[in-house]
Image: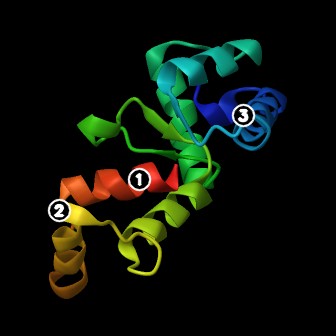
Amino acid sequence: QASPQKLRPTRLVEMERKLMLLSRKEKLSVVNVAQIQEVAKSCGLPTSDHEVLEVLKFFHQKGTLLYFDQVPALCDVVILCPQWLAKLLTYVLTNLICRPAGSLAQYAEERNKKGLLRQELLDCCVKQFL
């Protein structure tokens, strides 16, 4: 089992380039681990779960992508563009952009006055953002 630092740097650079292309050219902000394994395979890198996890942690520490393996709900989610997540969170948390109507308006008011963010409002804002 090779750590990412012991793998051939050219293959890691190639993988990083391919991930950035996915993010920019194909406009993918979020992918799953299986998609990352395919990219690793295309770069000649190991594709076992453990080895891909190590590569994801390496790229996370480097700031190339975001991967939260310690959060069960996110362990299959890879965010290719950290800036995308920052923009999404800004969108969700600011009153200026995400202003739902109808029954969700009370949740927006609650968010603004008490700092509480209900799942229904989060879902609405994320749909508007995407």
Q: Is residue 116 something that shows in the picture?
A: no
Q: Are marks 3 and 2 in contact (CB under 8 Å)?
A: no
Q: Is residue 90 above or below residue 122?
A: below
Residue 7 position by quadrant = top right
Answer with the quarter of the image where residue 22 lies. Answer: top right
Which residue is label 3 attached to? 22
Residue 22's place in the image compared with 128, above or below, is: above
Q: Residue at x 74, y 30 (%)?
A: 15
The residue at the point 60 percent across, 61 percent down is 83
Q: Which mark is residue 19?
A: none
Q: Which residue is mark 1?
A: 126
Q: Nearer the viewer, residue 54 or 125?
A: 125
Q: Nearer the viewer, mark 3 or mark 1?
A: 1
Relative image position of residue 76 (x, y in whole percent): 40, 29
User: Can you tell which quarter of the image residue 23 is in?
Assistant: top right
Q: Is residue 85 left or right of residue 62?
A: left
Q: Are marks 3 and 1 in contact (CB under 8 Å)?
A: no
Q: Earlier in the sequence, mark 3 or mark 1?
A: 3
Residue type beneath disc 2? Ser
